[in-house]
């Protein structure tokens, strides 16, 4: 048992060391992170991002998406790469408080922007209320989509509060209300392959009720 | 992605001149469609001019009682604008029927109009596609064409325009404001912005190289009941099989624009005179020249029934 408890290499440290990137690159059709390219014509640009409150000056190939900048350059691997085409929502982060797909935007387009990733919300010892609610309600199985779900969920509650309508809003001129229909519709950009949707909705409802 | 150089635009005129004169120059704003296609090397710009810093993100009232929407106004902000929700409900409804919350936070008004088709054969670079590679053929014709055009298509292309917002803009008679290289401005009625595929499906709009959309204006509100009815394979976050943007007045007259049926938002103003005579005659007039494939012939009865539901809803 001593050996096991002393075994400190976590799945996360393996991911950061790049083993997973190599494995991913070997699978056809799966988007691999973009490394510093050596092709001719490669352009490098400086950009300073504020990530989870910390200014991060970077020198990046112009092709680097915000997602790859976070994962590959800043080693913030909490934000996940799913489809890399804006279809799954695993890469959802908050930019100046608004949720976006970090895979469909270039890092250089975010000079001076304030970016919040899952790492900026809570820690293992002090979970953000939304993280705690996901745990309490079993709002995941494998957990891969969870960082994106949580970032998206926080923005959803803010969007409803700000009066932004959705496809589920019955009366365009009235302020939208927090209902399960509204949450389901607004969370449709976050896919959960494990199908934890009903528990995800319960977690979000709980946070909304606590805040209200 | 192929390598590209990047700059942030300082002014509209400078950005327009850069894109017009620099080979492979392109504007980038929301980037949600362009970057998606760049990753697949369907779009291969050599130089990106980031226009996000330009002062084109406001919604203002016009002297004529309408609204002038800046090119960079995000889909979320346009859908949420109180004036839009009150007087152009169709536009709000169409916007929130499209994409996801994340994408609507990024996608812009101008970019939405200029987005490319979601034809799977356009996306699959192993397939011939006259739009992606002129002269290579069309794999959709004779292929899986369930979601393709039923009207206005050609022997070269049966792709549809994917926008929901543009359907509302078409019914609302929006006008597109642009700046051409050299600084000349022009106004394009939305009816003339998108073109049918003909023999040149790679040409999708009348926008010239380097020309930038700076705003979209809406004429003063026309009242009526506004409905955007979208039929899709999932309840949310899917492109339309068919969609109908409708404005129905109390006297039974109205405007109808169709999505998911053609290379452009489909509206036949003359056919709208048939509205008081019922759904069947109206749809027959709007889609008089329809040539569906065996796989998408279902769109005709689907449109008829969806319009029936809209008119019933409008009557209350």
Image: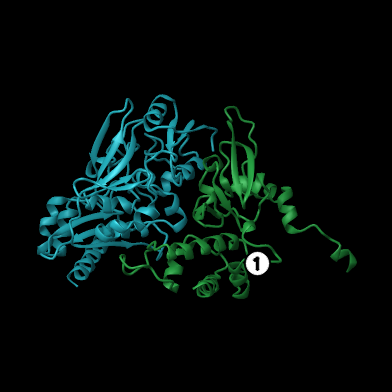
In the displayed structure image, the side of residue B120 where residue B150 appears, left or right? left
Counting other residues with Cα less than 10 Å from the Cα at mark 1, is it few (<14), some (14-19), or many (20 or more)? few
Quadrant the N terminus of chain A occupies = bottom right
Q: Quadrant of residue B299?
A: bottom left
Q: Position of residue A69 (x, y in %)?
A: 61, 45
Question: Which residue is identified by label 1?
Answer: A127
Q: Quadrant of residue B216?
A: top left
Q: Chain of mark 1?
A: A
Look at 35% across and 49% down and name the residue there. Answer: B142
Type of colouring = by chain
Q: Position of residue B73 (x, y in %)?
A: 37, 48
In the displayed structure image, the side of residue B273 where residue A102 appears, left or right? right
Q: Is label 1 in a helix, a strand or a loop?
A: loop
Look at 24% across and 37% down and name the residue there. Answer: B187
Q: Is residue B173 visible?
A: yes
Chain identifier, green in the render? A
Q: Is residue B149 visible?
A: no
Asked whether B294 or B220 is in front, the reply is: B220
Chain identifier, cyan in the render? B
In the displayed structure image, the side of residue B246 where residue B105 appears, left or right? right
Compared to residue B8, the image places residue A168 above or below, namely below
Asked whether B1 or B13 is in front, the reply is: B13
Asked whether B10 or B76 is in front, the reply is: B10
Compared to residue B88, the image places residue A33 above or below, namely above
Look at 85% across and 65% down and name the residue there. Answer: A4
Asked whether A14 or A181 is in front, the reply is: A181
Compared to residue A43, the image places residue B219 above or below, namely below
Look at 54% across and 69% down and name the residue there. Answer: A195
Compared to residue A84, the image places residue B316 above or below, namely below
């Amino acid at each position: 048992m001593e050996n096991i408890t002393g075994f400190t290499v976590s799945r996360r440290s393996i991911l950061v060391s790049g083993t997973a990137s190599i494995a991913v690159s070997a699978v056809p059709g799966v988007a691999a992170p973009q490394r510093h390219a050596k092709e001719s014509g490669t352009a490098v640009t400086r950009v300073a991002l504020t990530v989870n409150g910390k200014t991060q000056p970077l020198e990046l190939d112009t092709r680097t998406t915000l997602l790859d900048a976070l994962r590959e350059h800043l080693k913030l691997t909490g934000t996940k790469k799913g489809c890399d085409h804006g279809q799954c929502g695993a890469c959802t982060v908050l930019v100046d408080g608004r949720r976006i797909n970090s895979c469909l935007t270039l890092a250089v387009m975010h000079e001076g922007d304030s970016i919040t990733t899952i790492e900026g919300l809570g820690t293992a010892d002090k979970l953000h209320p939304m993280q705690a609610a996901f745990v309490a309600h079993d709002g995941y199985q494998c957990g891969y989509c969870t960082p994106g779900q949580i970032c998206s969920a926080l923005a959803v509650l803010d969007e409803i509060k700000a009066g932004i309508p959705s496809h589920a809003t019955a009366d365009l001129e009235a302020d939208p209300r927090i209902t399960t229909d509204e949450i389901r519709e607004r969370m449709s950009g976050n896919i959960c392959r494990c199908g934890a949707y009903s528990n995800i909705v319960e977690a979000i409802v709980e946070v909304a009720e606590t805040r209200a | 992605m192929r390598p590209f150089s990047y700059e942030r635009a300082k002014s509209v005129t400078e950005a327009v001149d850069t894109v017009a004169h620099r080979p492979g120059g392109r504007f980038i704003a929301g980037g949600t469609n362009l970057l998606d296609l760049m990753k697949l090397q369907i779009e291969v710009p050599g130089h990106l001019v980031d226009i996000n810093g330009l002062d084109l993100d406001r919604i203002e009232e016009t002297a004529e009682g309408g609204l002038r929407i800046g090119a960079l106004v995000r889909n979320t902000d346009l859908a949420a604008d109180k004036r839009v929700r009150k007087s152009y409900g169709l536009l709000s409804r169409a916007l929130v029927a499209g994409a996801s919350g994340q994408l609507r936070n990024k996608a812009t008004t101008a970019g939405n109009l200029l987005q490319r088709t979601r034809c799977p054969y356009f996306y699959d670079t192993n397939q011939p596609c006259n739009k992606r590679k002129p002269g290579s053929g069309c794999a959709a014709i004779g292929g899986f064409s369930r979601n393709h055009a039923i009207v206005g298509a050609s022997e070269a292309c049966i792709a549809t325009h994917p926008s929901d917002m543009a359907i509302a803009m078409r019914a609302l008679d929006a006008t597109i404001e642009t700046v051409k290289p050299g600084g000349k401005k022009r106004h394009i009625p939305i009816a003339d912005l998108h073109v049918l595929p003909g023999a040149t499906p790679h040409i999708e709009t009348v926008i010239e190289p380097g020309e930038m959309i700076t705003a979209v204006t809406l004429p003063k509100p026309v009242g009526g009941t506004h409905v955007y009815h979208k039929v899709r394979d999932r309840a949310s976050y899917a492109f339309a099989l068919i969609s109908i943007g409708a404005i129905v007045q109390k006297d039974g007259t109205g405007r109808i624009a169709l999505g998911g049926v053609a290379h452009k938002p489909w509206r036949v103003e003359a056919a709208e005179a048939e509205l008081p005579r019922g759904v069947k005659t109206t749809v027959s007039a709007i889609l008089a020249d329809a040539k569906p494939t065996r796989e998408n012939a279902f769109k005709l009865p689907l449109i008829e029934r969806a319009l029936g539901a809209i008119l019933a809803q409008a009557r209350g």
